[in-house]
Image (cartoon, helix red, strand yellow):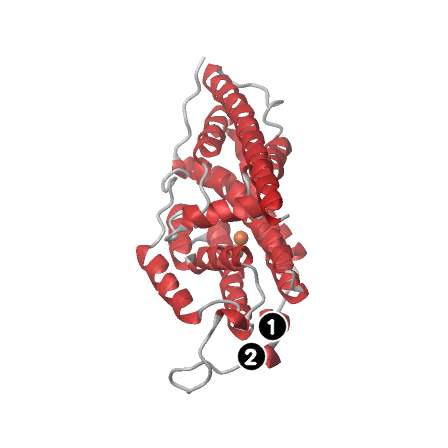
């Protein structure tokens, strides 16, 4: 037996109520916060150029290279918000509860890039010229969602992506060794967590509404997941650096991002799947096993690398 797939308009309409409820819930639990309170402004110093201050040098900041890389990747990812807004507005629409969410979410996300940039510039943590050039480069490329016209895949993607961003911000904050940065990124991470909950609840409702179609969407998204900043110039090298340092690695991706969301959806207990949905679920199980063994292989390689480096240092 196969079930007919619901089209995008039907899905949007059927989920409208769930959006309304979750928007209300979100607004009740989201705490107002002020980015300016998190920035140690008095530590700042004028740069060279127009105002004739001091040029940036790498000695200005005690950050490790990997902490610097992680902050840059996280900031550039946040910077591309106009493109993300375009993608979600085109898909969710700008009317009623869906539209209200799009605008509210965009407003919240807008704080993240602004606050992280303020921190980095005040603390002279990164080369400001290289950072601005990287931002121009990255934003000028734009971002195109891989699931552009597919509501269920998009909802599955953002459920994982918001949680991935949360984990990455949180671990980056710890990695800096600066309690001020850690506090700021923990605050940003708390926003990302609420975004994840919103999308996760929506997709959970979709799983009841259209189980086969939603199961397929989940499987496809787990199979092809990429971080939103994956097209940043030099991303692969930075991603490896971050994975080696434990800011975001495959183990965290599987155990702290993919699995908790799948568990919440109870994907392996969903009933009423047709053959289509069942085969998507079986593929998902295979993917999760592969992710697990890939993660273990990465951890083993990393342990060996660390042991080699220790021997060399000793
Ligand atoms: Fe964000
Ligand atoms: Fe977010």
x then y, percent, for residue 236: 42, 46
Q: Is residue 124 visible?
A: no
Q: Is residue 240 visible?
A: yes
Q: Quadrant of the N terminus?
A: top left
Query: What residue is drawn where x is 50% and y is 28%?
Result: 210
Mark 2, residues whose alpha carbon is within 10 Å: few (<14), some, or many (≥20)? Answer: some
Asked which secondary structure carries label 1, the reply is loop
Q: Which residue is mark 1?
A: 39
The quarter of the picture where residue 172 lies is bottom right
Asked which secondary structure carries label 2, the reply is loop
x then y, percent, for residue 183: 66, 62
Q: 217 or 91, which lies in front?
A: 217
Q: 48 or 104, which lies in front?
A: 48
Real-space CA distance between mark 2 and mark 1, rounded to the nearest whole angstrom: 10 Å
Query: What residue is drawn where x is 50% and y is 44%?
Result: 158
Q: 208 or 85, which lies in front?
A: 85
Q: Which residue is mark 2?
A: 44
Could you tell whether 63 is left or right of 31 in the image?
A: left
Mark 1, residues whose alpha carbon is within 10 Å: few (<14), some, or many (≥20)? Answer: many
Work out which residue is located at the far left of the displayed protein and give it.
141
Point out which mark residue 272 bears.
Answer: none
Work out which residue is located at the far bottom of the displayed protein and give it.
52
x then y, percent, for residue 49: 38, 82
């Amino acid at each position: 037996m196969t079930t007919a797939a619901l089209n995008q308009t039907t899905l949007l309409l059927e989920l409208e109520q769930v959006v309304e409820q979750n928007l209300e819930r979100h607004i009740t639990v989201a705490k107002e916060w002020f980015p300016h309170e998190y920035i140690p402004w008095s530590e700042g110093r004028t740069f060279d150029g127009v105002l004739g201050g001091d040029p940036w040098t790498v000695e200005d900041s005690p950050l490790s290279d990997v902490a610097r890389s992680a902050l840059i990747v996280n900031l550039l990812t946040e910077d591309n918000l106009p493109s993300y807004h375009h993608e979600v507005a085109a898909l969710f629409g700008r009317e009623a509860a869906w539209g209200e969410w799009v605008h509210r979410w965009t407003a919240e996300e807008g704080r993240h890039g602004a606050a992280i940039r303020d921190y980095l510039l005040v603390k002279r943590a990164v080369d400001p010229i290289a950072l601005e050039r990287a931002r121009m480069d990255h934003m000028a490329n734009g971002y195109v969602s891989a699931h552009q016209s597919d509501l269920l895949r998009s909802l599955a993607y953002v459920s994982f992506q918001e949680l991935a961003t949360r984990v990455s911000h949180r671990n980056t904050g710890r990695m800096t060794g600066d309690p001020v940065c850690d506090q700021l990124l923990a605050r940003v991470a708390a926003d990302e967590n609420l975004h994840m909950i919103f999308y996760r609840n929506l997709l959970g409702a979709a799983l009841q509404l259209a189980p086969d179609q939603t199961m397929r969407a989940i499987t496809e998204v787990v199979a092809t997941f990429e971080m939103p900043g994956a097209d940043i110039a030099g991303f692969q090298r930075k991603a490896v650096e971050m994975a080696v340092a434990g800011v975001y690695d495959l183990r965290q991706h599987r155990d702290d991002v993919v699995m908790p969301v799948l568990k919440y959806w109870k994907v392996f207990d969903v009933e009423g799947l047709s053959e289509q949905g069942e085969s998507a679920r079986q593929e998902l199980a295979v993917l999760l096993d592969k992710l697990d063994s890939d993660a273990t292989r990465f951890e083993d390689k990393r342990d060996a690398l660390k042991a080699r480096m220790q021997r060399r240092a000793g």
